Image (cartoon, rainbow, N blue to C red):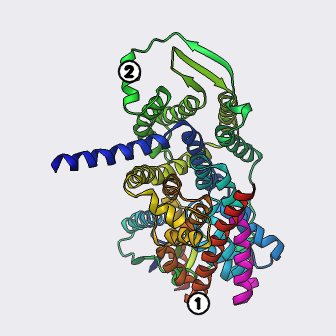
Amino acid sequence: MMENVVAFVWQLLTAGWLALLDYLAAHVLLCLLPAFFIAGALSSLIPKETITRYLGPRASKWVSYPASAVGGFVLAVCSCTILPLFAGIWKRGAGLGPAITFLFVGPAVNILAIAYTGAAIGMDIAVARILLSVIFGIGIGLIMARMFGEKTGAEADAGLFDRRAQVRPAVWTLFGLLIGILIVGTLQVDLLTRAWFSVTLPVDFPAGLLAGLEGAHLNLQGALLILMLLVIAPVAWIGMGQVMRKFNGWTWAALGLAVVTLLIAAPYVDTSSSLVVGLTGRFLGEVVLLGAVVVVAARGLERHELASWLGETWKFVKQIFPLLLVGVFGAGMVKAIIPGQWIQTLAGRNTVWANLFGVLFGVFMYFPTLVEVPIARMFLDLGMHRGPLLAYLMADPELSVQSILVTTKILGPKRTWAYVGLVTIFSTLAGYLFGLALAVL
Amino acid sequence: MLNIKVLGSGCNKCNQVEQQAVTALAALAEEDSSLEATIQHVTDYGEIMKYPIMFTPALVVNEHVVCAGSIPTVDEVAGWLREALDGAGEAG
């Protein structure tokens, strides 16, 4: 009896560990690491006024709806900015419709979530998630405006939206480069995956080392990456925690280690005979782009801008990464328990009911930001169809019991329930249509 | 008499603003021991929306919004508090 329990617990822990390894693999780090820096830059270097000036009471529909949809990308990296801004757009700005669009699209186009979805589940789902949430977000906004009247804010409040802000070319360049790092790190095309040169390093590993790693389901690259993360954690803790006040050696060390981690993740490594490092297009691209980022950041950014960029980035990492690790580990364990048959029966095929199941699961289960992605991956591995999977991914960050309660306070029960109903219908539809499209393509 | 309100959902940033306000207030109280002040953290959205702001955390001194959407430094907060005190002094 006792032995069975121990064996079962061991099996669960192994499942969690395997899931964790899968998520700390090279291709996921190549997306997450740059995405955190981009999120930090968005929230610290791009003034909110660059987008709010398009959301005032005088803005035309043709401007305010698209701006609300795009606004989420720039502004909504943190959920506590969404609600006040949502209330502001509704009461003082462009009105209920654009405000609803902003509320819907914001969590969906979060750069971290999109990049992570692309790396962990697939680019098809990531792209569908952006496109469908923008289209349906505008649709839901228009319907809500039609249902409850399009009343825009008072002229007196227009001043709140009139403020303009200048973003310097250096900051845009930096952004372009960071997005470039993300794309070069994640795109699966021949130009990037092919090894243009191979370097054979004259290192002989003791057979025991590699065999030992294999026992833990690791290869050399994976083990190095995990080692790097373990080293970065304390260094960043010391170096980044105080970055708003002062830089110290640890700050530079943490940044250097982050760069090295990316460069370890980028090449192709073969250890079958001797150590062969294939310098892929990905690796060469990352070297060039990272070098350019360093130059632009050093020349173009003021000291305090650099500090707040790093500070914000670190805040996101601290806030999200630990939860993510726990979530991934947990999802791995749950996967080992739930029979795939259940999921296949409920959502194995692309039916309206299966999509509705995906949406309802998303509404009633609350997961912290980004943890929805490993959960979705777990469903996929258990046999969920990609249609319902998208429906789940769209609904989960949008609606939770908690967010419904808060939204009720701002919008009142009637508008809230209309919104919840529309989101449920549209997310179900989104998954269903995506599933159909997959079958055709 | 100072009436200070921190508007925000209770998130990390809002708590930092409250912290700054408390520190600034303590500094002022050392200069003037007769200073009277109240500080309040408003988390109710209905209440928050009565103020003309677009971003939280926001800081309100004697019903004037002095900053929104960013975390001010202690010196900045102390400056606003002094202004509010001077304004009240002249009016009274």
Can the viewer see residue B38?
yes
Instruction: Name the mark on residue A209.
Output: 2
* Mark found first going from the N terminus, 2 or 1: 2
Q: Mark 2, mark 1: which one is toward the viewer?
A: 2
Q: CA distance from mark 2 to mark 1?
A: 64 Å
| Res A152 seen here | no
Give neighbour class at mark 2: few <14, some 14-19, many 20+ (Cα, 10 Å).
few
The numbered disc on residue A414 is 1
**Which quadrant of the rendered structure holds the C terminus of chain A?**
bottom right
Q: Residue furthest top?
A: A202
Q: Amino acid at mark 1?
A: Lys
Which residue lies most toward the left here?
A: A2
Secondary structure beneath disc 1? Answer: helix
Of A119 and A154, nearer the camera is A119
- Residue at the image point whose x is 50% and y is 57% from the top: A379
Q: Label 2 is found on which chain of the structure?
A: A
Secondary element at tag 2: helix
Q: Residue A115: x percent and y percent?
A: 62, 50
- Asked if residue A100 is positioned above or below residue A295 in the image, the reply reads below
Amino acid type, residue under disc 2 in the picture: Leu
Whether callout 2 and callout 1 share a subunit is answered yes
- In the picture, measured across the screen, residue A368 lies left or right of residue A430, that is left
Asked whether A19 or A166 is in front, the reply is: A19
